[in-house]
Every structure is written in structure tokens, then in C-alpha cells.
Image: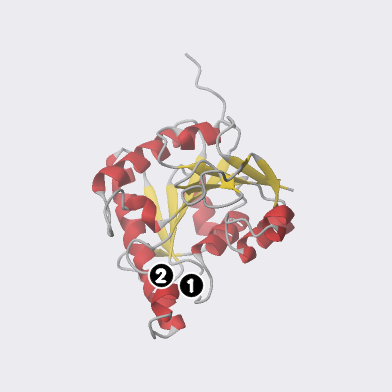
Amino acid sequence: MTAPAAAYRRILLKLSGEALMGEQPFGIDAAVTAQIAREIVDVQALGVQVAVVIGGGNIFRGLSASTSGLDRATGDYMGMLGTVINALALSDSIERQGAETRVLTAIEMRQVAEPFIRRRALRHLDKGRVVVFAAGTGNPYFTTDTAAALRAMEIRAEVILKATKVDGIFTADPHREPDAERLENVSHLQVLERQLKVMDATAISLCMDNQLPIVVFNLRTPGNIRRAVLGEPVGSVVST
């Protein structure tokens, strides 16, 4: 039986740190991480090159800590280190599923990960390895959303798949406002003008300037990563 054709050749999957928590209050749930890893390997089996940017909110949030008196830059660097922990956990889980990975970090720590070098990342993708980007952009005051947009442009990804806890983009938080409307298609400019909670303004602006689409979907629905890659209607689409 012929495998279905993927809609994209190269994708960037944006995962929040909270995605690895499952129902735990913090940390990493091994079963949830394994499920995400299986879905990533399943997508790669379609012939799709996969890169991942992962957050660190399940371990530490620099912005939240800065409200308690911690220096913002220091807090952001601590958050970046949290993303490295998550990247290593996800990488290990993916390799347990039989795929090769490489963790590339924007903060140099050669004992645990490779430094981010754009051409090296492209070579890894061409060789069929899942590339996990860690440590954000390596700079404070920039979110992992912005890192995802930046890395997607650098590796020439065709789409950003933004994994969330809800079924796409809504006019308000559907957990707090059950009557919130889901928007199936929206432009980058509309996201900015309406201040929709998709990605931060810097990330959306980068995607808009480079005409990079974003698919926002519910990670908690099994198989949604594959559906998004196949171009099936899942979640919401941000495009020009």
C-alpha cells in the first residue's frame, strides 16, 4: 500500500515545555514524551524532514521569575537551560523509537549538544536526522516562539506546526470563555491587529515578512501532527 503524500518536505514543530508535562504540575512525563516521539518518527517515515524547537516552561520561566525580583536576563538564561533539558529528553525518546537525532543549542555546551551552526543543521536534516533546537535564540528577551520563527527561516522550513492545548486559534481563551469562536483561517496581519494568542508579535512579524505559514493544532489529539503534515484540515492556519 502506497504511503500518503505529505504536503510539506521540511517542517519545524514548535513544542512548549508544558507539552512534556502531561498532567503533572511540572517536569517531564516519560509516557507523554514517548507519545510525541512516536508521532515525530511516524511523520519522518513519510519522507518529511523534521526540526523541533522546544520551550522550557515546565522547568523554569524567566519572565515569570523576573516579576519576583530575579534579573530578567538571568531568568531568561535559566529558562534557556531548561529547554536544553527538554531537548535532551525528547531526543532520547525519539532515538528509542529508532530514529537518529541531533540536539543543537544556541548556548555552547559541547559535552551535551552540538553548537547551532546553520549549515550543520541542514546537513543533519538532509541525512534524515531529527534536529532538536535548544536554548532559544541564545539571547535574553526573546521567546522560543521567536526562536521557532528564526530557525524555520534559517533551515528553509515550509511551515511551522505550532502544537498547543486547544484545537486551533480562538477569539478568546476557550477554557475560560466557552463561547469563543475558532478561526480556521487568519492572516498574520489579523493575528497582530486582533492580538490573538498564537505566537508573540516578533515571531508573527518574522513569519509575515517571509510568508511562512503557521498551522496551530491540538497536540493532545493523537495523530494530529501527521494530519497536519498531510495537509488535512486540523486546527487553524495562519497565512498571508
The kind of residue on which mark 1 rests is Gly
As drawn, 114 above or below 231 = below
Q: Which residue is mark 2?
A: 80
Q: Which residue is mark 1?
A: 138
Specify the quadrant of the image occupied by residue 55.
Answer: bottom left
Asked if residue 188 lies left or right of residue 197, the reply is right
Secondary element at tag 1: loop
The image shows residue 85 at horizontal and vertical percentages of 32, 62
Q: Position of residue 174 (x, y in %)?
A: 51, 47
Residue 121 x/y as whole percent: 50, 55
Rounded to the nearest angstrom, the CA distance separating label 2 from label 1 is 7 Å
Determine contact: label 2, label 1, CB under 8 Å: yes
Q: Residue at x 51, y 64 (%)?
A: 117
Closer-to-camera residue (128/161)? 161
Left or right for 224, reference 5: left
User: Mark 2: which secondary structure?
Assistant: helix
**Residue ID at (72%, 51%):** 211
Residue 172 shows up from this direction: yes
N-term mark: 2 or 1: 2
| Residue for point 43% across, 45% down | 129
